Amino acid sequence: MHPPRTIAALCLLLTGTSLSAATASASQTLQVNISPAASFSTSSYSFTLTKSGSLFISSGRFTGYTANLTLLYQARTGAASTTAGITVKATSDFAPAGGPAIASGPVLTYTCAGPTLGTGCTGVQTVSTVSATRVVTLPAMACTGGGSPCSNGDPNSATMSFFLPDDPKYRTGFYTTNLQFTISGI
Amino acid sequence: MRQLLPALTMCLAAVSAVYGQASAQGYLNLGPNAGLIVSSTPSLTKGGTAFGDFSGVTTLTYYIRTSQVGGSGSIQMKITNDFRPAGGPLAASGHLTYSCTANTPTNGGAATPCTGQATASTTTQTTVTSFGPDARSSLAGDTASVQWSLKNDPAFKAGSYSGTVTFTISAN
């Protein structure tokens, strides 16, 4: 036994078909607003500063400690992007006390190399506990992956080379610090 | 057949983050370290009397960091080339003695210079200064010195003589 609604629909269909063929069309507009976006492909990193070269340079002063860190990121910047890019800031100084202190001056510095999207920082930058400093600058209308006009690589990468001078006043021991990276698409 | 189907507009707003964040933890293991600069070679000069001893000073700039617990360090020296040519003084014969001074490390710890008048050796290391735990010099280095005294024996032939002393600094 057919439900009443099905029977009624069949009647309408048969009646229409016997008179003339009918077609129906409907249009639908699909619109998407793609906004600038940016994120890190890996959100947690670590690096170990190790002694570079011999114990001390010819002047007698100690050589410093170095480390490399490669950031992985994806980004899409807007047409009016002016501040897009990656910055870094120390959210906690070296601990425990007695070792290097970022807050006390230019202690932890870095240079930037090889961003696969954007432009790396120029010269030697100093990590700060107060303000964020630039690592990568992203131009307007930049995008990750897929080839031109976007980058070929996905994710993109940028390498930071850290340097920490070894001051004899630092006490021996194991120290840690925390850095926070922020990426912006605008 | 007239059908009026309302145009359906679908606005798909791409919901994505304009900002992203990541964190990094940096590790640093600071160990003991030491470095040394030796001033220019001193010219030993004769004292006031006819056969008074020759004397001179070597100034050392040291850089050091010893372990906080149980650490130590030292500046040692050895005569690696005795006086030449032959016929003059010989460190190996005990003709060369020295005394020491050492400034306290600027950033902590202790430095203990050698005491009295010691005899330089061509065979073993002799201590110029010893450092205790948590000794930390300044970035520009701190100073120690060696005051030389060379016997002026009438038996030595007249001439110019030279030897080599090698200093070694260590920290642990």
Image (cartoon, coloured by chain):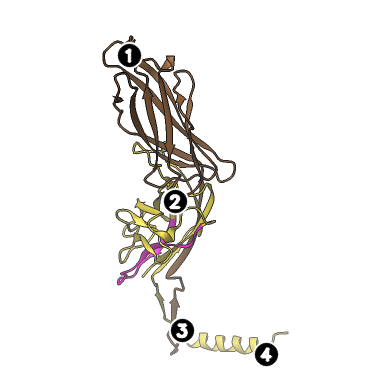
Mark 3 or mark 2, earlier in chain: 3
Q: Is residue B172 visible?
A: no
C-alpha gap between disc 1 and disc 2: 55 Å
Q: Secondary structure at mark 3?
A: loop
| 10 Å crowding of disc 4: few (<14), some (14-19), many (20+) | few
Q: Which residues are magenta?
A: A72-94
**Discs 3 and 4 lie in a common subunit:** yes
Instruction: Find residue A22 and name its label.
Output: 3
What number is the disc on residue A50? Answer: none
Q: Chain of mark 2?
A: A
Q: In the rendering, at what x and y percent does residue A180 appear?
A: 46, 62
In the rendered image, what is the letter of the chain coloured yellow?
Answer: A
Q: Which chain is brown?
A: B
Name the mark on residue A69: 2
The circle on residue B84 is 1
Query: How far apart are labels 1 and 3 at the CA level?
Result: 120 Å
Q: Residue at x 45, y 20 (%)?
A: B121
Q: Which mark is residue A4?
A: 4
The Cα atoms of the two marked residues, 4 and 2, are separated by: 71 Å
User: What residue type is disc 1 on?
Assistant: Arg
The secondary structure type at the circle numbered 1 is: strand
Q: Disc 3 residue type? A: Ala
**How far is the residue under mark 4 from the one under mark 1?**
126 Å
Counting residues from the N terminus, which is met first, the one under dot 3 or under dot 4? 4
Amino acid found under the numbered disc labelled 4: Pro
First along the sequence among labels 4 and 2: 4
Callouts 4 and 2 in the same chain: yes
Relative side of B74 to B43, left or right: right
B127 and A56: which is toward the camera:
B127
- Most frequent secondary structure within the magenta stretch: strand
